[in-house]
Amino acid sequence: MSIPNDTLPGTLNLDPTTGLPLTQANGSDIVNDAALSDGDVVDVLNDLLENARDGEYGFKTCAEQVETANAKQLFATRAEGCRQAGEELLQLIRQYGGEPASGGTAAGALHRGWVQIKGSVGADSELSILESCERGEDTAIARYRKALKQPLPADVLAVVQRQADGAQKNHDQIRDLRNAARATS
C-alpha cells in the first residue's frame, strides 16, 4: 500500500516540477522575498540621496582645500559624479511617488566642517584631505551595502548596485592616492 508522503510524520511535500520540498521550491525558507512598499523604497532612496549630496558637498570642500591641480580635478570630478547620482535618485524617488529629501546629513555637514577647520589651521595637506575623503567614502559604501540588503525592485536595484560599485571605485582610487601620499611624506 502506498502512503502519500504528506501524511507521514517528518516528510515534506515535494514540488512536482522541481522535485524540491515545497518550502524550498518557492524560496520561503531561504529568502524573505516580500517586496518593499513604494514608501519603503522611497525611504531607501532618500537615504542614498542624502549620501550622494554629502559626497558632492564633501568633494567640493576637499577641492577647495587642496592646492595641486590633480587633486582639485579629482575632487571636482568626484563631486560631479555624486551630483549625477543624486539626480538619478531624485528621478527614482519621484517615480515611486515620493518627495525627495531636502539636503545631506548632519554627519556629512560635520565632516565637511572638519575638513574646513583642518584647512584653516594649516593641516590641509593632501594626505590629510585624502584620509578624510576615504572616511567619507567608507560611510557611503556602508550606506549602499545597507540599501542592497533590502528587497528592492529590479529597476531600483540596478541603479543602487551601479552606484555602489562607483562608490567602491571612488574609495579605492582615493585609498591608492592616500597610500601614495603616505609613501612620499
Image (cartoon, grey):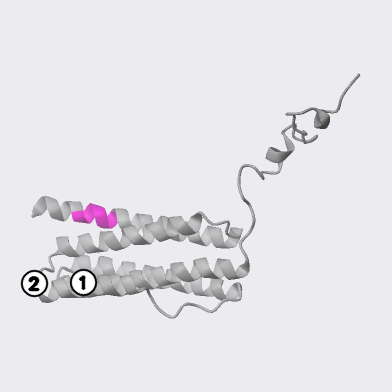
Q: Tell me which segment is drawn in magenta.
A: 173-178
- Residue at position x 45%, y 67% from top? 48
The overriding secondary structure of the stretch rendered in magenta is helix
Percent from the top left, x then y, of residue 156? 56, 62
Q: Which amino acid does the dot numbered 2 rest on?
A: Gly
The amino acid type, in three-letter code, at marker 1 is: Trp
* Residue under numbered circle 2: 122
Kindly state the secondary structure of the residue where label 1 is placed: helix
Rendered view: 8 above or below 149? above
The percent position of residue 50, horizontal first and vertical second, equals 41, 72
Tell me which label, 2 or 1, sits earlier in the chain.
1
Viewport quadrant of the C terminus:
bottom left
2 and 1 marks in contact (CB < 8 Å): no
Query: Helix, strand or loop at disc 2?
Result: loop
Where residue 87 sits in the image (x, y, percent)? 47, 74
Determine the CA span between mark 2 and mark 1: 12 Å
Please give the residue where the numbered disc 1 appears in the rendered image.
Answer: 114
Q: Name the residue rendered at 60%, 46% in the picture.
A: 31
User: Which is nearer the eye, 57 or 34?
Assistant: 34
Task: Give the side of residue 59 with respect to residue 117, left or right.
Answer: right
